[in-house]
């Protein structure tokens, strides 16, 4: 697995802006929700990052800066410890990034689902093991 280098998003932020480390927990169109010191905080995504596939995912450790009254902006994406991918049903050669910095994968499915979708738990376990994630 390739290690992702730290990606600096915005060099134009003031040098005296305080930077905080946080974890991405939700991604919407032009905003992310991050976990900052045990509270959820909305954070703007720079326009340069929006169109790039797999550049930001739930679990990414990031640096954010305060740009106004309780308004934060993504400054830097820190290197990932691991990345969890799944296959793309539309294109077998493509992979879709699901999460980063995962410690454990717990798969729960109903018995009815297993009858109709055989192989799902096995595929999830294989993908997790390839990424170095513990499976439960």
Image (cartoon, rainbow, N blue to C red):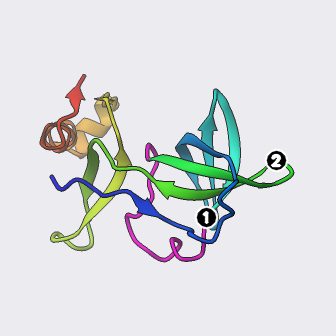
Q: Is residue 111 left or right of residue 15?
A: left
- Report the residue that reaches farthest toward the top: 136
Determine the secondary structure under disc 1.
Answer: loop
In the rendered image, which quarter is residue 105 located in? top left
- Residue at image location 64% in from the left, 29% down from the top: 37
Residue 136 within the magenta-colored segment of the rendering: no
What residue range appears in magenta?
45-60
Q: Residue at x 22, y 27 (%)?
A: 135
Q: Earlier in the sequence, mark 2 or mark 1?
A: 1
Number of numbered discs overlaid on the protein picture: 2
User: Disc 2 marks which residue?
Assistant: 70
Q: Most prominent secondary structure in the magenta stretch?
A: loop
- Where the C terminus falls, by quadrant? top left
Residue 45 is labelled as 1
Q: Residues within 10 Å of mark 1 (few under 14, many from 20)?
A: many
Tell which of 119 and 7 is nearer to you. 7
The residue closer to the viewer here, 113 or 5, is 5
The residue under the point 67% across, 54% down is 43
Nearer to us in this view, 14 or 7: 14
Please provide percent x and percent y for residue 108.
34, 29
Q: Nearer the viewer, residue 37 or 134?
A: 37
Point out which mark residue 72 bears: none
Q: Position of residue 126 (x, y in %)?
A: 13, 41
Picture residue at 56% right of the left edge, 69% below the top: 11
């Amino acid at each position: 697995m390739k290690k992702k280098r730290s990606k600096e998003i915005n060099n134009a932020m003031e040098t005296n802006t305080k930077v905080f480390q946080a974890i991405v927990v939700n991604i919407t169109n032009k905003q992310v929700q991050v976990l900052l010191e045990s509270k959820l905080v909305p954070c703007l995504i720079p326009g340069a990052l929006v169109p790039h596939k797999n550049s930001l995912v739930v679990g990414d450790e990031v640096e954010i800066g305060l740009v106004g009254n309780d308004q934060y902006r993504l400054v830097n994406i820190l290197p990932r410890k691991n990345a969890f991918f799944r296959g793309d049903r539309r294109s077998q050669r493509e992979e879709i990034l699901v999460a980063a910095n995962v410690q454990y994968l717990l798969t729960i499915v109903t018995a009815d689902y297993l009858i109709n979708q055989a192989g799902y738990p096995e595929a999830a376990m294989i993908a997790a093991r390839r990424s170095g994630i513990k499976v439960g």
